[in-house]
Image: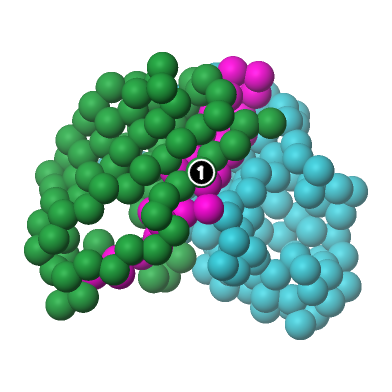
Chain colours: A cyan, B green
Amino acid sequence: EPEVTQTPSHQVTQMGQEVILRCVPISNHLYFYWYRQILGQKVEFLVSFYNNEISEKSEIFDDQFSVERPDGSNFTLKIRSTKLEDSAMYFCASSDGGGGDTQYFGPGTRLTVL
Amino acid sequence: GIQVEQSPPDLILQEGANSTLRCNFSDSVNNLQWFHQNPWGQLINLFYIPSGTKQNGRLSATTVATERYSLLYISSSQTTDSGVYFCAVGVFASNYQLIWGAGTKLIIKP
């Protein structure tokens, strides 16, 4: 069964550094998402991406964050200057359609900012 | 915005027991998904169920959209069922984001 993959599984970085989290969505999917989960808290929506542009973003997704689909398979989340409070699990998801289609999630990247 | 509430917040059971987890939501939804977050933090898709009933092995789910709730049933629990169960919903006002409940933490004791 096709699945969403994410790399790395764990990233440790110093405050102020840039990080790029990578995702390979399911190959025929058209909609891509990033969510995050701070330890012990609920999962929160960050951004959705369709047709090479952001479709929707939350208040969390400020100017420090950006997303890109650099080629036909990868989908990346960049955090320009990491803060301690960016420490969280970051999940990538993809779906075939928007408007309520099933979203399939990757295994997550645990980001630790020191 | 829509509110998603899950109950109970914590549940401790002996292996072999059955359980029912509940998800209430405050507005009409066009998507409802149940997930299991395992001890390693991975989110496992259990059901896509904006309405109706589905079964997959020992797990089943029912969503009554008109009454704005969904139930997840786990029968004959095993220790590997331990983890956090999340309900997440999509709303008609947004084509994309899932809004998540706080989860039910399930511990199955051997």
Residue at the image position 40 percent from the left and 31 percent from the top: B69
Q: Position of residue A59 (x, y in %)?
A: 81, 43
Q: Nearer the viewer, residue B70 or A87?
A: B70
| Whether residue B55 can be seen here | yes
Q: Secondary structure at mark 1?
A: strand
> Above or below — where is B46 with respect to A21?
above
Q: Position of residue B25 (x, y in %)?
A: 51, 32
Residue at the image position 26 percent from the left and 36 percent from the top: B61
Q: Nearer the viewer, residue B8 or A9?
A: B8
Query: Which corner quadrant holds the N terminus of chain A?
Result: top left
Q: Position of residue B35 (x, y in %)?
A: 39, 48
* Residue kind at label 1, given as amino acid type: Glu
> Above or below — where is B9 with respect to A8?
above
Residue at the image position 31 percent from the left and 38 percent from the top: B71
Residue B4 lies in quadrant = top right
Q: Is residue A81 magenta?
A: no
Q: Nearer the viewer, residue A64 or B96?
A: B96
Write the start and end of the magenta stretch as one range.
Answer: B82-108
Which residue, given by chain and number where applicable, does mark 1 sit on? B5
Residue at the image position 88 percent from the left and 73 percent from the top: A16
Residue A50 lies in quadrant = top right
Q: Chain of mark 1?
A: B
Q: Position of residue A114 (x, y in %)?
A: 76, 82
Q: Is residue B88 magenta?
A: yes
